[in-house]
Amino acid sequence: MSWRIVTVTNRCKLEHRLDYLVCRGEETTKIHLSEISVLVVETPAVAITASLMCELIKRKIKVIFCDEKHNPCFELCPTSLRYDASGCLRKQINWSEQNKKNVWTQIVRQKIFQQMEVLRQNDLAQQAGKLFEYLGELQDGDITNREGHAAKVYFNALFGKEFSRQDVCFINAALDYGYSILLSAFNREVVCCGYLTNLGLNHNNEFNHFNLSCDLMEPFRPVVDRQVLRLEGEVFTKEQRHILQNMLNKEIVYNDKKYCLKDAISVYVKDAISVIETGSGSIKYYTYDV
């Protein structure tokens, strides 16, 4: 099973040779493709061959490309990894609106619960109690926007009342980077299941190519928040980026079984899509400690 998260930080050429990723820079490094789970190209000063990109797609290796500021800006996604992708697409287009609303309600409930757990773990019992109240007020489809109210209490409790997700600061740089890594993992699994990331449950921005992934990842955002809380500094560093990349290998308990996070996401996405299509069952909760 693949497990390596490979990060390329310097100018080089990446190519495919005899089932190996070959990195030719000041030195030549080889890594067997079977070991790689995620490849992060952190600088635009990297040349990559078409042969390697095709092989990465065949092996379902997630590839994330970053801009000159080392922020994830796009990823390598296959057109499909399933033989029955057209059938999956027809099912996705015909998903029941009520089923989508029910699953979105479950997603919001779990997201608020996970935020409440983060607050409790950081001795913020009063704010955690407020989120517990919001859970009791949650209605079908979250028509009263308990998610938004909970987010305000949550982020102000963790990072201060003056904090805003719109600020240009160290915390937001780290959060955005971590969320991008998480989103890429969800994109991979949605595509592997044969569905389009564009067609969401609640997210429906016509300019967002990842509406469905953005919906499904919501309960897992607190995983990133936990990691960012442990970071210190004023400038978001390479070492801190690598810490956030490595969270995909952290252990998580999902549906009473232990997985690394990236594998838990794979099971979770399949479970969520099954609930959407059948209208029965519920998405499972997870526990995650750092």
Image (spheres, helix red, strand yellow):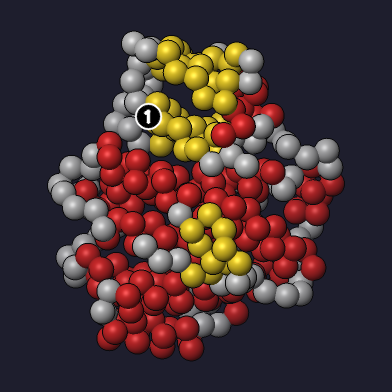
Q: Residue at x 72, y 36 (%)?
A: 80
- Position of 81 with respect to 157 (left or right) is right
Quarter residue 148 falls in: bottom left
Q: Residue at x 58, y 20 (%)?
A: 20
Q: Residue furthest left?
A: 234
Q: How many marks?
A: 1
Quarter residue 107 falls in: bottom right
The amino acid type of the residue labelled 1 equals: Glu
Quarter containing the C terminus: bottom left
Q: Position of residue 212 (x, y in %)?
A: 60, 53
- Position of 17 with respect to 9 (left or right) is right
Q: Which residue is mark 1?
A: 42
Q: Residue at x 27, y 74 (%)?
A: 122
Quarter containing the N terminus: top right
Q: Is residue 173 above or below residue 98?
A: above
Query: Quick one: 9 or 90, which is closer to the camera?
Result: 9
Label 1 Cα crowd, 10 Å radius (few <14 / some 14-19 / many 20+): many
Q: Position of residue 126 (x, y in %)?
A: 27, 86
Element type at mark 1: loop
